[in-house]
Protein backbone atom coordinates (compact mmCIF):
# COMPACT_ATOMS: atom_id res chain seq x y z
CA UNK A 1 0.00 0.00 0.00
CA UNK A 2 1.26 3.49 -0.82
CA UNK A 3 2.43 5.38 2.27
CA UNK A 4 1.23 8.94 2.75
CA UNK A 5 3.94 11.27 3.92
CA UNK A 6 3.58 14.67 5.47
CA UNK A 7 3.85 17.82 3.37
CA UNK A 8 6.42 20.24 4.71
CA UNK A 9 6.60 23.97 4.14
CA UNK A 10 10.17 24.82 5.10
CA UNK A 11 13.52 23.64 3.94
CA UNK A 12 14.49 20.01 4.32
CA UNK A 13 15.52 19.09 7.88
CA UNK A 14 18.85 17.60 8.94
CA UNK A 15 20.79 18.10 5.70
CA UNK A 16 23.91 20.15 4.99
CA UNK A 17 24.13 22.98 2.43
CA UNK A 18 26.41 20.71 0.41
CA UNK A 19 23.77 17.99 0.29
CA UNK A 20 21.14 20.53 -0.79
CA UNK A 21 23.40 21.47 -3.69
CA UNK A 22 23.86 17.79 -4.50
CA UNK A 23 20.08 17.31 -4.64
CA UNK A 24 19.76 20.26 -7.03
CA UNK A 25 22.52 18.90 -9.29
CA UNK A 26 21.05 15.38 -9.46
CA UNK A 27 17.55 16.70 -10.16
CA UNK A 28 18.93 19.04 -12.83
CA UNK A 29 20.72 16.12 -14.51
CA UNK A 30 17.49 14.10 -14.40
CA UNK A 31 15.72 17.00 -16.12
CA UNK A 32 18.54 17.19 -18.68
CA UNK A 33 17.98 13.51 -19.54
CA UNK A 34 14.26 14.28 -19.67
CA UNK A 35 14.87 17.00 -22.25
CA UNK A 36 17.50 14.98 -24.13
CA UNK A 37 15.06 12.13 -24.70
CA UNK A 38 12.30 14.61 -25.59
CA UNK A 39 14.32 16.78 -27.96
CA UNK A 40 16.54 14.30 -29.78
CA UNK A 41 13.68 13.48 -32.12
CA UNK A 42 13.78 17.04 -33.51
CA UNK A 43 17.28 16.73 -35.03
CA UNK A 44 16.39 13.22 -36.23
CA UNK A 45 13.13 14.42 -37.80
CA UNK A 46 14.32 14.68 -41.40
CA UNK A 47 15.96 11.21 -41.60
CA UNK A 48 12.92 9.74 -39.82
CA UNK A 49 10.64 11.51 -42.30
CA UNK A 50 12.52 10.02 -45.24
CA UNK A 51 12.85 6.53 -43.76
CA UNK A 52 9.23 6.19 -42.59
CA UNK A 53 7.81 8.44 -45.37
CA UNK A 54 6.04 10.90 -43.08
CA UNK A 55 4.31 14.20 -43.81
CA UNK A 56 5.16 17.36 -41.87
CA UNK A 57 1.95 17.10 -39.84
CA UNK A 58 2.99 13.60 -38.76
CA UNK A 59 6.37 14.94 -37.67
CA UNK A 60 4.48 17.58 -35.69
CA UNK A 61 2.33 14.90 -34.06
CA UNK A 62 5.31 12.74 -33.13
CA UNK A 63 7.40 15.63 -31.78
CA UNK A 64 4.51 17.52 -30.21
CA UNK A 65 0.82 16.69 -29.90
CA UNK A 66 0.84 12.99 -29.01
CA UNK A 67 3.69 13.52 -26.56
CA UNK A 68 2.06 16.57 -24.98
CA UNK A 69 -1.37 14.98 -24.54
CA UNK A 70 -0.10 12.09 -22.46
CA UNK A 71 2.59 14.13 -20.71
CA UNK A 72 0.09 16.72 -19.55
CA UNK A 73 -2.88 14.49 -18.73
CA UNK A 74 -0.78 12.07 -16.67
CA UNK A 75 1.08 14.90 -14.96
CA UNK A 76 -1.87 15.82 -12.72
CA UNK A 77 -2.49 12.37 -11.12
CA UNK A 78 1.27 11.95 -10.71
CA UNK A 79 1.41 15.34 -9.00
CA UNK A 80 -1.41 14.38 -6.64
CA UNK A 81 0.64 11.32 -5.73
CA UNK A 82 3.69 13.55 -5.25
CA UNK A 83 1.77 15.95 -2.98
CA UNK A 84 1.26 13.12 -0.49
CA UNK A 85 3.80 10.40 -1.29
CA UNK A 86 7.49 9.64 -1.90
CA UNK A 87 8.66 12.05 -4.56
CA UNK A 88 12.12 10.51 -4.84
CA UNK A 89 10.64 7.10 -5.69
CA UNK A 90 8.33 8.70 -8.26
CA UNK A 91 11.22 10.43 -10.03
CA UNK A 92 13.35 7.26 -10.06
CA UNK A 93 10.50 5.19 -11.50
CA UNK A 94 9.75 7.85 -14.11
CA UNK A 95 13.38 7.77 -15.26
CA UNK A 96 13.17 4.03 -15.90
CA UNK A 97 9.96 4.38 -17.94
CA UNK A 98 10.94 7.26 -20.22
CA UNK A 99 14.47 5.99 -20.79
CA UNK A 100 13.19 2.53 -21.74
CA UNK A 101 10.70 3.91 -24.23
CA UNK A 102 13.35 6.20 -25.75
CA UNK A 103 15.42 3.12 -26.51
CA UNK A 104 12.31 1.46 -27.97
CA UNK A 105 11.80 4.39 -30.42
CA UNK A 106 14.79 3.07 -32.35
CA UNK A 107 12.84 -0.10 -33.22
CA UNK A 108 9.81 1.68 -34.73
CA UNK A 109 8.95 0.60 -38.29
CA UNK A 110 5.97 2.88 -38.96
CA UNK A 111 4.36 6.16 -37.95
CA UNK A 112 1.96 4.38 -35.56
CA UNK A 113 4.76 2.44 -33.85
CA UNK A 114 6.88 5.56 -33.40
CA UNK A 115 3.83 7.42 -32.09
CA UNK A 116 3.22 4.71 -29.47
CA UNK A 117 6.84 4.77 -28.35
CA UNK A 118 6.76 8.57 -27.99
CA UNK A 119 3.59 8.24 -25.92
CA UNK A 120 5.54 5.89 -23.66
CA UNK A 121 8.30 8.48 -23.30
CA UNK A 122 5.68 11.08 -22.37
CA UNK A 123 4.15 8.76 -19.79
CA UNK A 124 7.47 8.48 -17.98
CA UNK A 125 8.47 12.12 -18.29
CA UNK A 126 5.20 13.19 -16.63
CA UNK A 127 6.69 11.96 -13.35
CA UNK A 128 9.74 14.23 -13.30
CA UNK A 129 9.08 17.95 -12.93
CA UNK A 130 6.02 18.18 -10.59
CA UNK A 131 7.67 16.18 -7.77
CA UNK A 132 11.04 17.83 -8.51
CA UNK A 133 9.56 21.34 -8.19
CA UNK A 134 7.95 20.41 -4.89
CA UNK A 135 11.22 18.96 -3.56
CA UNK A 136 13.28 21.96 -4.65
CA UNK A 137 10.84 24.42 -3.08
CA UNK A 138 11.33 22.64 0.25
CA UNK A 139 15.11 22.31 -0.02
CA UNK A 140 15.72 25.93 -1.12
CA UNK A 141 15.22 29.03 1.10
CA UNK A 142 12.36 31.24 -0.04
CA UNK A 143 14.67 34.11 -1.00
CA UNK A 144 16.53 31.80 -3.41
CA UNK A 145 13.49 30.03 -4.83
CA UNK A 146 13.69 31.43 -8.39
CA UNK A 147 17.45 30.78 -8.55
CA UNK A 148 17.00 27.18 -7.38
CA UNK A 149 14.19 26.50 -9.84
CA UNK A 150 16.18 28.24 -12.58
CA UNK A 151 19.16 25.99 -11.81
CA UNK A 152 16.89 22.96 -12.17
CA UNK A 153 15.64 24.43 -15.44
CA UNK A 154 19.20 24.44 -16.76
CA UNK A 155 18.32 20.85 -17.60
CA UNK A 156 16.37 22.27 -20.55
CA UNK A 157 19.37 23.79 -22.37
CA UNK A 158 21.76 21.06 -21.25
CA UNK A 159 19.40 18.32 -22.43
CA UNK A 160 18.65 20.19 -25.65
CA UNK A 161 22.38 20.65 -26.30
CA UNK A 162 23.09 16.96 -25.75
CA UNK A 163 20.05 15.86 -27.74
CA UNK A 164 20.80 18.01 -30.75
CA UNK A 165 24.57 17.50 -30.71
CA UNK A 166 24.67 13.77 -30.01
CA UNK A 167 21.59 13.16 -32.14
CA UNK A 168 23.12 14.88 -35.14
CA UNK A 169 26.50 13.17 -34.78
CA UNK A 170 24.98 9.73 -34.17
CA UNK A 171 22.50 10.11 -37.03
CA UNK A 172 25.33 10.78 -39.49
CA UNK A 173 27.61 8.03 -38.16
CA UNK A 174 25.31 5.26 -36.88
CA UNK A 175 21.78 6.18 -37.99
CA UNK A 176 18.74 7.55 -36.20
CA UNK A 177 17.74 4.21 -34.67
CA UNK A 178 21.03 3.79 -32.81
CA UNK A 179 20.82 7.43 -31.70
CA UNK A 180 17.62 6.67 -29.78
CA UNK A 181 19.14 3.62 -28.09
CA UNK A 182 22.24 5.47 -26.92
CA UNK A 183 20.19 8.46 -25.73
CA UNK A 184 17.98 6.37 -23.46
CA UNK A 185 20.59 4.18 -21.76
CA UNK A 186 22.12 6.73 -19.29
CA UNK A 187 18.71 7.44 -17.75
CA UNK A 188 18.48 3.87 -16.49
CA UNK A 189 21.73 4.35 -14.54
CA UNK A 190 20.62 7.72 -13.15
CA UNK A 191 17.42 6.13 -11.83
CA UNK A 192 19.56 3.99 -9.52
CA UNK A 193 21.50 7.05 -8.31
CA UNK A 194 18.26 8.93 -7.56
CA UNK A 195 16.71 6.02 -5.68
CA UNK A 196 19.78 5.34 -3.55
CA UNK A 197 21.13 8.83 -2.76
CA UNK A 198 18.27 11.36 -2.63
CA UNK A 199 16.38 11.86 0.65
CA UNK A 200 12.64 12.43 0.84
CA UNK A 201 12.25 15.19 3.52
CA UNK A 202 8.83 13.89 4.54
CA UNK A 203 10.29 10.64 5.85
CA UNK A 204 12.14 12.48 8.64
CA UNK A 205 8.87 14.11 9.72
CA UNK A 206 7.04 10.78 9.72
CA UNK A 207 9.72 9.30 11.98
CA UNK A 208 9.20 12.19 14.40
CA UNK A 209 5.47 11.55 14.44
CA UNK A 210 4.50 14.65 12.46
CA UNK A 211 0.86 14.92 11.31
CA UNK A 212 0.09 13.96 7.69
CA UNK A 213 -2.45 16.47 6.34
CA UNK A 214 -3.63 15.89 2.79
CA UNK A 215 -5.87 17.83 0.46
CA UNK A 216 -8.31 16.39 -2.04
CA UNK A 217 -7.95 17.25 -5.71
CA UNK A 218 -11.13 19.32 -5.47
CA UNK A 219 -9.72 21.45 -2.64
CA UNK A 220 -6.39 21.85 -4.44
CA UNK A 221 -8.08 22.93 -7.66
CA UNK A 222 -10.34 25.31 -5.74
CA UNK A 223 -7.23 27.02 -4.37
CA UNK A 224 -5.76 27.28 -7.87
CA UNK A 225 -9.01 28.62 -9.32
CA UNK A 226 -8.84 31.52 -6.88
CA UNK A 227 -5.35 32.49 -8.06
CA UNK A 228 -5.81 34.53 -11.21
CA UNK A 229 -2.09 35.25 -11.53
CA UNK A 230 -1.41 31.49 -11.62
CA UNK A 231 -3.59 31.03 -14.72
CA UNK A 232 -2.18 34.10 -16.45
CA UNK A 233 1.41 32.89 -15.91
CA UNK A 234 0.54 29.33 -16.98
CA UNK A 235 -1.19 30.34 -20.23
CA UNK A 236 1.56 32.89 -20.96
CA UNK A 237 4.10 30.12 -20.55
CA UNK A 238 2.05 28.05 -22.97
CA UNK A 239 2.24 30.67 -25.71
CA UNK A 240 5.98 31.28 -25.27
CA UNK A 241 6.50 27.50 -25.38
CA UNK A 242 4.31 27.36 -28.50
CA UNK A 243 7.01 29.32 -30.32
CA UNK A 244 10.00 27.63 -28.67
CA UNK A 245 8.82 24.04 -29.15
CA UNK A 246 7.30 24.75 -32.54
CA UNK A 247 10.52 26.22 -33.86
CA UNK A 248 12.71 23.63 -32.16
CA UNK A 249 10.78 20.79 -33.77
CA UNK A 250 11.44 22.18 -37.26
CA UNK A 251 14.84 23.87 -37.00
CA UNK A 252 16.51 20.77 -38.43
CA UNK A 253 14.10 20.57 -41.36
CA UNK A 254 14.24 24.35 -41.95
CA UNK A 255 18.02 24.51 -42.20
CA UNK A 256 18.27 21.35 -44.32
CA UNK A 257 15.62 22.61 -46.77
CA UNK A 258 16.60 26.30 -46.90
CA UNK A 259 20.37 26.03 -46.51
CA UNK A 260 21.00 22.45 -47.63
CA UNK A 261 23.81 23.27 -50.04
CA UNK A 262 25.63 25.47 -47.52
CA UNK A 263 25.14 22.82 -44.84
CA UNK A 264 26.68 20.20 -47.09
CA UNK A 265 29.71 22.42 -47.61
CA UNK A 266 30.11 23.18 -43.90
CA UNK A 267 29.59 19.53 -43.01
CA UNK A 268 32.25 18.46 -45.47
CA UNK A 269 34.70 21.09 -44.22
CA UNK A 270 34.16 20.07 -40.60
CA UNK A 271 34.22 16.35 -41.28
CA UNK A 272 30.93 15.92 -39.40
CA UNK A 273 28.44 15.58 -42.27
CA UNK A 274 25.55 17.99 -42.82
CA UNK A 275 23.26 16.66 -40.05
CA UNK A 276 26.18 16.23 -37.67
CA UNK A 277 27.34 19.82 -38.20
CA UNK A 278 23.78 21.14 -37.85
CA UNK A 279 23.23 19.15 -34.65
CA UNK A 280 26.42 20.48 -33.08
CA UNK A 281 25.68 24.07 -34.16
CA UNK A 282 22.08 24.05 -32.97
CA UNK A 283 23.00 22.17 -29.82
CA UNK A 284 25.58 24.77 -28.84
CA UNK A 285 23.38 27.73 -29.79
CA UNK A 286 20.22 26.45 -28.10
CA UNK A 287 22.14 25.06 -25.14
CA UNK A 288 24.27 28.12 -24.46
CA UNK A 289 21.55 30.66 -25.26
CA UNK A 290 18.86 28.97 -23.20
CA UNK A 291 21.34 28.22 -20.42
CA UNK A 292 22.51 31.81 -20.09
CA UNK A 293 18.93 33.05 -20.28
CA UNK A 294 17.73 30.56 -17.67
CA UNK A 295 20.52 31.42 -15.22
CA UNK A 296 20.12 35.19 -15.68
CA UNK A 297 16.35 34.90 -15.41
CA UNK A 298 16.56 33.21 -12.01
CA UNK A 299 19.16 35.61 -10.60
CA UNK A 300 17.47 38.76 -11.92
CA UNK A 301 14.01 37.64 -10.82
CA UNK A 302 15.15 36.83 -7.27
CA UNK A 303 16.84 40.22 -7.10
CA UNK A 304 13.75 42.01 -8.39
CA UNK A 305 11.38 40.04 -6.14
CA UNK A 306 13.26 40.77 -2.88
CA UNK A 307 11.15 43.86 -2.43
CA UNK A 308 8.23 43.07 -4.75
CA UNK A 309 7.03 39.71 -6.09
CA UNK A 310 5.88 41.52 -9.25
CA UNK A 311 9.40 40.91 -10.57
CA UNK A 312 8.51 37.25 -11.11
CA UNK A 313 5.99 38.28 -13.80
CA UNK A 314 7.49 41.51 -15.12
CA UNK A 315 10.79 39.98 -16.28
CA UNK A 316 9.18 37.28 -18.50
CA UNK A 317 6.83 39.93 -19.93
CA UNK A 318 9.81 41.94 -21.18
CA UNK A 319 11.64 38.81 -22.36
CA UNK A 320 8.77 37.56 -24.51
CA UNK A 321 8.19 41.03 -25.95
CA UNK A 322 11.76 40.89 -27.26
CA UNK A 323 11.41 37.20 -28.20
CA UNK A 324 8.72 37.70 -30.86
CA UNK A 325 10.87 39.54 -33.43
CA UNK A 326 13.95 37.54 -32.40
CA UNK A 327 12.37 34.20 -33.32
CA UNK A 328 10.87 35.57 -36.57
CA UNK A 329 14.21 36.98 -37.78
CA UNK A 330 15.88 33.54 -37.74
CA UNK A 331 14.01 32.72 -40.95
CA UNK A 332 14.98 35.92 -42.79
CA UNK A 333 18.70 35.81 -43.77
CA UNK A 334 19.97 34.24 -46.99
CA UNK A 335 23.20 33.39 -45.17
CA UNK A 336 23.20 30.23 -43.06
CA UNK A 337 25.82 31.71 -40.73
CA UNK A 338 23.65 34.72 -39.90
CA UNK A 339 20.50 32.63 -39.64
CA UNK A 340 22.18 30.30 -37.14
CA UNK A 341 23.59 33.24 -35.16
CA UNK A 342 20.11 34.72 -34.74
CA UNK A 343 18.96 31.56 -32.96
CA UNK A 344 21.06 32.64 -29.94
CA UNK A 345 19.18 35.81 -28.87
CA UNK A 346 15.83 34.16 -29.58
CA UNK A 347 16.37 31.19 -27.27
CA UNK A 348 18.11 33.39 -24.67
CA UNK A 349 14.96 35.52 -24.45
CA UNK A 350 12.82 32.44 -23.99
CA UNK A 351 15.18 31.07 -21.32
CA UNK A 352 14.72 34.23 -19.25
CA UNK A 353 11.12 33.18 -18.54
CA UNK A 354 11.70 29.78 -16.90
CA UNK A 355 12.90 30.57 -13.37
CA UNK A 356 10.59 33.56 -12.77
CA UNK A 357 7.49 31.75 -14.07
CA UNK A 358 8.14 28.63 -11.98
CA UNK A 359 8.86 30.74 -8.89
CA UNK A 360 5.70 32.79 -9.42
CA UNK A 361 3.57 29.64 -9.44
CA UNK A 362 5.23 28.16 -6.34
CA UNK A 363 4.82 31.50 -4.51
CA UNK A 364 1.04 31.71 -4.82
CA UNK A 365 0.08 28.28 -3.40
CA UNK A 366 0.47 26.41 -0.10
CA UNK A 367 3.00 23.60 0.37
CA UNK A 368 0.32 20.91 0.07
CA UNK A 369 -0.59 22.10 -3.44
CA UNK A 370 2.86 22.77 -4.91
CA UNK A 371 3.25 19.60 -7.00
CA UNK A 372 -0.33 19.92 -8.25
CA UNK A 373 0.28 23.57 -9.18
CA UNK A 374 3.44 22.56 -11.07
CA UNK A 375 1.52 19.82 -12.89
CA UNK A 376 -1.33 22.13 -13.93
CA UNK A 377 1.25 24.70 -15.07
CA UNK A 378 2.99 22.04 -17.16
CA UNK A 379 -0.37 20.82 -18.46
CA UNK A 380 -1.12 24.22 -19.97
CA UNK A 381 2.45 24.98 -21.03
CA UNK A 382 2.83 21.67 -22.81
CA UNK A 383 -0.65 21.26 -24.28
CA UNK A 384 -0.43 24.76 -25.80
CA UNK A 385 3.30 24.78 -26.50
CA UNK A 386 4.51 21.25 -27.11
CA UNK A 387 1.12 19.94 -28.24
CA UNK A 388 -0.02 22.69 -30.59
CA UNK A 389 3.24 24.43 -31.52
CA UNK A 390 4.87 21.77 -33.73
CA UNK A 391 1.51 20.51 -35.01
CA UNK A 392 0.30 24.00 -36.03
CA UNK A 393 3.58 24.85 -37.74
CA UNK A 394 3.50 21.47 -39.52
CA UNK A 395 -0.09 21.90 -40.74
CA UNK A 396 0.51 25.49 -41.85
CA UNK A 397 3.71 24.40 -43.59
CA UNK A 398 1.86 21.69 -45.54
CA UNK A 399 -0.86 24.20 -46.46
CA UNK A 400 1.56 26.91 -47.63
CA UNK A 401 3.69 24.34 -49.45
CA UNK A 402 0.85 23.80 -51.94
CA UNK A 403 1.39 27.36 -53.17
CA UNK A 404 4.98 28.23 -52.19
CA UNK A 405 6.80 24.90 -52.15
CA UNK A 406 8.09 22.88 -49.20
CA UNK A 407 11.01 25.18 -48.36
CA UNK A 408 9.15 28.52 -48.40
CA UNK A 409 6.05 26.98 -46.81
CA UNK A 410 7.98 25.91 -43.73
CA UNK A 411 9.96 29.16 -43.54
CA UNK A 412 6.83 31.35 -43.59
CA UNK A 413 4.96 29.07 -41.22
CA UNK A 414 7.72 29.40 -38.61
CA UNK A 415 8.06 33.17 -39.09
CA UNK A 416 4.33 33.81 -38.72
CA UNK A 417 3.93 31.68 -35.61
CA UNK A 418 6.65 33.66 -33.79
CA UNK A 419 3.92 36.27 -33.19
CA UNK A 420 2.50 34.09 -30.38
CA UNK A 421 5.29 35.50 -28.20
CA UNK A 422 3.38 38.80 -28.17
CA UNK A 423 0.36 37.05 -26.66
CA UNK A 424 2.65 35.68 -23.94
CA UNK A 425 4.02 39.16 -23.22
CA UNK A 426 0.51 40.57 -22.72
CA UNK A 427 -0.49 37.76 -20.35
CA UNK A 428 2.68 38.03 -18.26
CA UNK A 429 2.00 41.77 -18.02
CA UNK A 430 -1.51 41.13 -16.71
CA UNK A 431 -0.12 38.64 -14.18
CA UNK A 432 2.24 41.32 -12.86
CA UNK A 433 -0.79 43.43 -11.93
CA UNK A 434 -2.38 40.62 -9.91
CA UNK A 435 0.38 38.55 -8.31
CA UNK A 436 0.71 40.63 -5.12
CA UNK A 437 -2.87 39.75 -4.16
CA UNK A 438 -2.27 36.02 -4.69
CA UNK A 439 1.05 35.60 -2.84
CA UNK A 440 1.27 33.24 0.15
CA UNK A 441 4.12 33.01 2.66
Image (cartoon, helix red, strand yellow):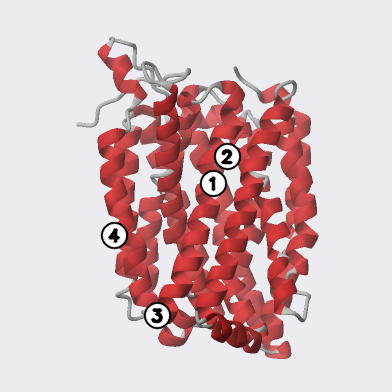
Which residue matches tag 2? 150
Residue at the disc numbered 1: 154
Q: Which residue is nearer to you in this view: 161 or 258? A: 161
Return the disc, 1 or 4, that comes first in the chain's sequence.
Answer: 4
Find disc 4 in the rendering and name its residue. 100
Q: In which quarter of the image is residue 22?
A: top left
| Quarter of the figure that contains the C terminus | top right
Question: Which percent across, then down, holds residue 301?
Answer: 69, 33
- How far apart are the two marked residues, 1 and 4, measured between alpha carbons? 23 Å
Task: Give the alpha-carbon distance from disc 1 to disc 3, as whole Å.
Answer: 28 Å
Q: Distance between the residues labelled 1 and 2?
A: 6 Å
Quarter of the rendering containing residue 440: top right
Residue 94: numbered disc: none
Q: Where is residue 268 in the image (x, y as percent from the top left)?
A: 55, 86
Badge 1 element: loop
| Residue nearest the viewer, comparing 356 with 291 | 291
Furthest-left residue in this view: 1
How far apart are the alpha carbons under marks 4 and 2? Answer: 27 Å
Marks 2 and 3, how far apart at CA: 35 Å
**Residue at position x 62%, y 62% in the image:** 285
Circle 3 — which element? helix
N-term mark: 2 or 3: 2
Q: How crowded is mark 4: few (under 14 residues within 10 Å), some or many (20 or more)?
A: many
From the image, tell me which residue sits under label 3: 173
Determine the CA span between mark 3 and mark 4. 23 Å
Amino acid sequence: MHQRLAPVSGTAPDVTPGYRRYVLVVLMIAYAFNMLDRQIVTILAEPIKQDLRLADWQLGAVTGLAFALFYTVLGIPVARLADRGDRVAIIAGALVVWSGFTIACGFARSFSELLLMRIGVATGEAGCTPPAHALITEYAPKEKRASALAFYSLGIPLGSLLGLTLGGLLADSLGWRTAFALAGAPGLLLAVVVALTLKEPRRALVKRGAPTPTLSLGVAMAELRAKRSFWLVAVAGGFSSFVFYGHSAFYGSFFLRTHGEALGRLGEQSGLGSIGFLGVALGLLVGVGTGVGTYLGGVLADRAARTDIVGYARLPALATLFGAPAFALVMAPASIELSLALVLPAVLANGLTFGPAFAAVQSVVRAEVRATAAAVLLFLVNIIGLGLGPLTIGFLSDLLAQHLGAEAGLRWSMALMASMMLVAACLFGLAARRIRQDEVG
